[in-house]
Image (spheres, coloured by chain):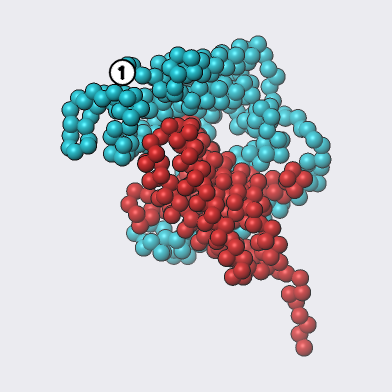
Chain colours: A red, B cyan
């Protein structure tokens, strides 16, 4: 892993975490469900994960969420911070299938499908398994409350990850030009 | 949009003089101690200790006022949610039932439930001063070096210091793009419909991500040109050497952690302290 952690990935991780942190903490979109916000940030972490791989994705979610908790609650709520990282980590595992195509300017239905499936699995793992289980193990929270919160988070974040992630990947791919994209004008 | 990050101020107090590494260790030891216990006596002890440290490090109330309001609301919400969903959780944990009065149906107020929720409230409250002390007394550029001192790979630390360094720039870009889009007539207020809200976020997010990707290229090229990442180790300009005070404070925090684990395994024989038996 470390050999693949190139300078570009490091910088992307750093800046990606800054964007994630900005949206996570300061840009809140009220959702149709009252008293809940759509976290656009999860779309951002999944986008970076799809381009730069699992470690970058994990760190963007983890660092961005931890910083946000530090400045708004004084201390991170570790179980959810880890879960934020995991959701992007899973998307990072399919970056080998998405990133090369996007760098060539292609983002077709096939890539879209892979991304969406990975994003849903990642969010399911994070909010239905990791966050509730860690809440119970670390913080001894009652079982029913954590799963209630987990399911809400899963539905909202999976939708945001897919929609925002696909919009961003599509836009980013359209700025790239692939090999042989020029043709002689007869 | 007003974005205020860490209001770190350079003061000369005992806590500020400590190295970032030892402050991070103390923070992790003490928060772990709180995380692993549900004994209100230990929690209150750590809380008193951290409030004394806050006094020593001269943190003013106005620096943490907004944070306290946020946390207070969050804890209140959590308090109510716990009661609504699990009104008998305390009874389940402590094994006894002392009913004070009953509201309706299964919603009775028991001493056990009150004690459990009180402990939980204190548990979450007591972590806050620790985080505040750590964040407000550690120089942001020393933060990354202290993580490296704990054993985290320097590449990850660089990513973190880039986050702290470029956050204000990204926030400024966000404001600029947002103003530009408003000048073009995009509705930014809360009056817009839900689908329009998603569209206007995309209108800001896409340019912001494109700028960020350009910047990634620029910074990583500059770093590569200066030979970044060639060696296995790196030194940090802002790293402070460890002194006696650092070792003492780390030892004290470690003792607190060990003490809390001792109480958990040899006195209470469980995570919870049970005054009802």
Q: Report the quarter where the C terminus of chain B lies.
A: top left
**B41 to A111, vertically: above or below:** above
Q: Quadrant of residue A145?
A: top left
The image shows residue B154 at horizontal and vertical percentages of 71, 35
The reply to whether residue B277 is in sight is yes
Q: Chain of mark 1?
A: B
The reply to whether residue B180 is in sight is no
Report the label total.
Answer: 1
> Which residue occupies the extreme bottom position in the image?
A186
**B125 to B182, vertically: above or below:** above
Q: Residues within 10 Å of mark 1 (few under 14, many from 20)?
A: few
Q: Quadrant of residue B144?
A: top right
| Point 45% across, 19% down: residue | B269
- Identify which residue, B73 or A54, lies in the foreground: A54
SS for dot 1: loop
- Identify which residue, B252 or B154, lies in the foreground: B252
Lateral position of residue A134 relative to residue A146, left or right:
right
The image shows residue B20 at horizontal and vertical percentages of 62, 24
| Point 40% across, 50% down: residue | A152
User: For mark 1, what is the residue?
Assistant: B276
The image shows residue A45 at horizontal and vertical percentages of 57, 51
| Point 71% across, 62% down: residue | A100
Q: Quadrant of residue B109?
A: top left
The image shows residue B101 at horizontal and vertical percentages of 17, 28
| Point 48% across, 47% down: residue | A127
């Amino acid at each position: 892993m470390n050999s693949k952690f190139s300078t570009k990935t490091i910088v992307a991780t750093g800046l990606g975490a800054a964007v994630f942190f900005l949206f996570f903490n300061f840009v809140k979109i009220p959702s149709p469900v009252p008293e809940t916000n759509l976290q656009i940030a999860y779309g951002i972490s999944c986008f970076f994960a799809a381009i730069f791989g699992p470690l970058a994705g994990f760190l963007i979610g983890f660092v961005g969420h931890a910083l946000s908790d530090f400045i708004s609650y004084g201390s991170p709520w570790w179980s959810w911070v880890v879960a934020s990282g995991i959701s992007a980590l899973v998307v990072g595992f399919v970056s080998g299938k998405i990133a090369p195509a996007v760098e060539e300017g292609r983002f077709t239905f096939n890539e879209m499908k892979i991304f969406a499936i990975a994003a849903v699995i990642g969010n399911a793992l994070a909010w239905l398994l990791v966050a509730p289980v860690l809440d119970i193990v670390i913080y001894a929270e009652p079982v029913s409350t954590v799963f209630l919160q987990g399911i809400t988070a899963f539905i909202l974040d999976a939708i945001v990850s897919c929609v925002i992630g696909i919009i961003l990947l599509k836009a980013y791919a359209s700025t790239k030009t692939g090999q042989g994209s020029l043709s002689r004008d007869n | 949009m007003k974005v205020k990050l860490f209001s770190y101020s350079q003061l000369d107090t005992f806590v500020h003089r400590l190295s970032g590494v030892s402050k991070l260790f103390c923070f992790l030891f003490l928060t772990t101690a709180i995380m692993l216990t549900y004994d209100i006596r230990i929690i209150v002890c750590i809380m008193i200790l951290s409030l004394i440290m806050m006094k020593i490090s001269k943190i003013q109330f106005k620096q943490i006022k907004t944070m306290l309001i946020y946390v207070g609301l969050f804890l209140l919400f959590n308090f109510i949610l716990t009661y609504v969903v699990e009104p008998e959780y305390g009874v389940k944990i402590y094994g006894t039932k002392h009913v004070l009065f009953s509201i309706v149906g299964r919603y009775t107020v028991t001493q056990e439930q009150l004690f459990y929720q009180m402990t939980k409230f204190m548990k979450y409250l007591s972590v806050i001063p620790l985080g505040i002390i750590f964040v407000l007394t550690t120089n942001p550029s020393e933060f990354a070096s202290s993580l490296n001192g704990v054993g985290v790979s320097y590449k990850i630390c660089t990513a973190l210091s880039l986050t702290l360094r470029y956050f204000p720039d990204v926030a400024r870009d966000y404001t600029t793009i947002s103003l530009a889009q408003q000048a073009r007539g995009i509705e930014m207020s809360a009056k817009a419909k839900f689908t329009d809200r998603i569209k206007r976020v995309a209108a800001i997010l896409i340019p912001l991500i494109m700028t960020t990707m350009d910047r990634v290229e620029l910074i990583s090229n500059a770093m590569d040109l200066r030979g970044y990442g060639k060696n296995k180790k790196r030194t940090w300009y802002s790293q402070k050497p460890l002194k006696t005070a650092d070792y003492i404070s780390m030892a004290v925090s470690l003792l607190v952690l060990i003490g809390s684990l001792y109480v958990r395994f040899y006195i209470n024989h469980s995570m919870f302290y049970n005054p009802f038996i």
